Image (cartoon, coloured by chain):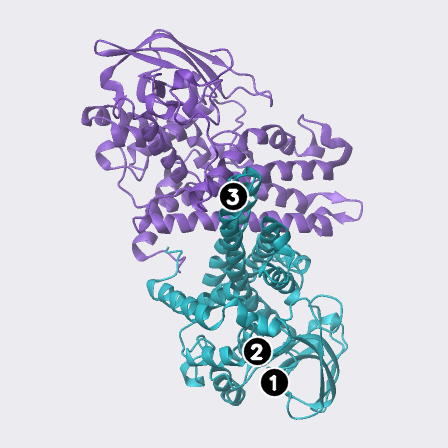
Amino acid sequence: MNFDFSDDQKQLRDQARKFLSEKCPPKAVRVVLDGKAPYDKELWKGLAEMGFLGVAIPEEFGGAGAGHLELCVIAEEMGRANAPVPFSSTVYLAAEALLIAGSDAQKKKWLPAIAAGEAIGTLALFEGKGNPSPKNVKLTAANGVLNGVKKPVADGAIADFAVVAARTGSSGRESDISLFLVDLKAGGVEVKSLTNLDPTRGQAELTFKDAKAEPLGAAGEGWSILTQVLDRAAVLCAFEQVGGADRALEMGRDYALDRIAFGRQIGSFQAVKHMLADMYVSATLARSNSYYGAWALSTNAAELPEAAAAARISATQAFQHCAKNNIQVHGGMGFTWEFDCHMYYRRANAMALGLGSLSYWEDQLIDRMRKKNAA
Amino acid sequence: MNFDDTPQEAAFRETARKWIEANAPKELHAELSKSSLGRIRLANRDIVDVGKAWQKKKFEGNWACLHWPREYGGRGATPIERVIWQQEEGVYGKLTQPFQIGEGMCGPTVMAFGSEDAKRRYLPKLASGEEIWCQLFSEPSAGSDVAGLRTRAEKKGDSWVVNGQKIWTSGAHYSDYGLLIARTDPNVPKHKGLTMFFLDMKSPGVEVRPIKQANGMQEFNEVYFTDVVIPDSQRLGAVGEGWSVSLTTLMNERMSIGARLATGVPEMFEFCSSLMLEDGLAIDDPAVRSKLATWAAKSNGLKYTSYRTISALSKGERPGPENSIGKLVSGMMLQDIATCAMDLQGAAGVLTGNDEETVQGQFQQMLLSSPSMRIAGGTDEILRNIIAERVLGLPGDIRVDKDVPYNKIPTKGR
């Protein structure tokens, strides 16, 4: 057993941190936050040049072929920096779906473009309220075209293509759902940007009107593929959340050391110290669960479904907890637009919903633990 | 990032498994499996007797105190091998309860500060379970502020004469030796006037009085010292260095924490999986699920945090204060889980007997015992201070007594 990242992976982390601290300081994040750009194009290009977009994409499809542990390391840094780019949509969701279910031709078409920063992808799953469930998929696929509405779709307004969950049957079973690939620039899709909690990551409504689509994976296998994609993305997002939680904790700690009240650093008051200690505890539990998830992801272990759910829950709670209390430590200044605290608060709470809400993953964890206990 | 055994680790696991299969007291398996919260309830046998028998067997098979050097009764095992052993030992590990303080804290302190003679004399017998050790740190006026302790040790010739009182001493009533910290100089600030010793608990002048606890049990004791003589050869570390010696003890306590912390989660999961509520199984109730999932994720987080610590240890890093989180998280969780389980039992939850409705009162016992988990070995508040100060680098508390000679510190009734 060696429950840690390797020296090479740690070096990659340092490299990613250095790159992001130069190319993605808070003022760069604010350009997107303030609506002056839909995402940071320069940063996206830079990430491609660094090889970060294709780190887990095999070399034959234009990636670095390093692996998922390396991707976890980068994900953590992306979360720390609050990077305003469609990384999770493109890399964790679209690329993972292609890797799991794509034909050779589909992989050849999209994966090298993703690695090169030339294509943004996303997953179009949700249709309004509710969590991931075959029942909630109403959009239909027939005769090679899709009809229906997806909302919200993360990064949908800037995406070049989407993996779309569609209904191809009406038996009431999971096998009613199939996945499709849609080139969003090919016509038949109306795109509308939606305002959302975290403006540094856009959300959109996509209306499909006889939009041309090609199957991704076998017909009727959609839900099973999707479940795998969501599990894998849950681990990767957990690393982003851990990165964000750690950064929020650091911001709170630094402010508590800097701010003087009642003639003392506020970090010398136990009420403040204990709040920060509790933030450290939740961030640490989240990190450990995420490491286990990373191991399961990178080895495709049978434990992945349970590990992913636990990592997702732990990391969601930790990021929300740290982001919320970071504002509390900052007091009034934490509630200004000028201070960066709210950017993490927004990101934490938006990420808590993106792959299905906390209660959805709590359900998943219990179901998966029961399945294991029964086996 | 690798969870699989290396070939050597797999071979070690296989050897351990076979030995346990051949030697473990299988007749106790069912009872031990049901004992939760680290509290063992055996119907007809005394835990110390049964524990000593298992410990002796392990010692003879070279499976006791695995990480200690062979010459002191251990196996010279790596941190990972120790974890593998604990995994394989499973429920039988609960039998090590009487030896945990000796193995986890007293032994390592003797190893670090004892003479070669002392190490060879005491450590193998500690490892074999023949002699049990306890730890004499806390006092009635020195709990969280342990450096404020009052028990005096005065030098008389080649010996020390000890007078005072300790409290919360687990297992003092069945211990053979004790690790004792006492004040040897009251004229200097409190941390500087302390010295560490070990003593024979059968020495004249040592009186052990059990404490009846809030949960009705008696696991802790008060220990009184009246003119107890300790030879200077039983001093550990230099005179006045007791505080820094105690930090070694506490550091080792952290190392021994982790793999065996009770969280209550497996018990709660099983309970919710079988409890029928009006609308179906408890585990199908959304409110129950939500709590259970959060606890399960926390409990997993603790487990993997200890694995990270072990990986760091096996690379030669020292265990740090970050490991304080184990007890902090599990103590609160036990209390919350007990409360929730009893809530699900409704009116019957009030019963503490052998009732079927309450699964023999296991959560009631958990409820009554859990406050001690949040106090013993560092209160939740002290642990948060440790994390805040030593991990996050926040300022220490303002201490009005830090640079004042001990005998000038204002106090109640000294």
Mark 1 = which residue? A161
Q: Nearer the viewer, residue A110 or B352?
A: A110
Residue shown at the point (28%, 28%) measured from the top left: B110
- The chain carrying label 1 is A
Q: Which residue is mark 3?
A: A267
- Looking at the picture, tell me which residue is in the foreground, B137 or B280: B137
**Badges 2 and 3: C-beta atoms under 8 Å apart?**
no
Locate residue A104, reporting x and y percent. Answer: 50, 87
Precedes in sequence: disc 1 or disc 3: 1
User: Compared with residue A216, is residue A329 higher up or lower down, i.e. above or below?
Assistant: above
User: In the figure, is residue A100 to the left or right of B146?
Assistant: right
Q: Is residue A63 above or below residue B252?
A: below
The residue under label 2 is which amino acid type? Ala
Name the image quarter holding the N terminus of chain A: bottom left
Name the kind of residue labelled 1 in the image.
Phe
Query: What residue is rendered at 61% in x and 85% in y?
Result: A161
User: Separation of disc 2 and disc 3 at Cα?
Assistant: 43 Å
Instruction: State which tag comes first along the sequence, 2 or 1.
Output: 2
- Taking the view exactly as shown, the residue that stands out farthest to the right is B278
Residue B145, x across and y down, in percent:
46, 26
Whether tag 2 and tag 1 are in contact, CB under 8 A, the answer is: yes
In the picture as drawn, the residue positioned furthest to the left comes out as B116
**Which amino acid, mark 3?**
Gly
Q: Which mark is residue A328?
A: none
As drawn, the chain in cyan is A
Judge from the rendering whether residue B336 lies leftward or rightward of residue B140; answer left or right. Answer: right
Q: What element does badge 2 sit on?
A: helix
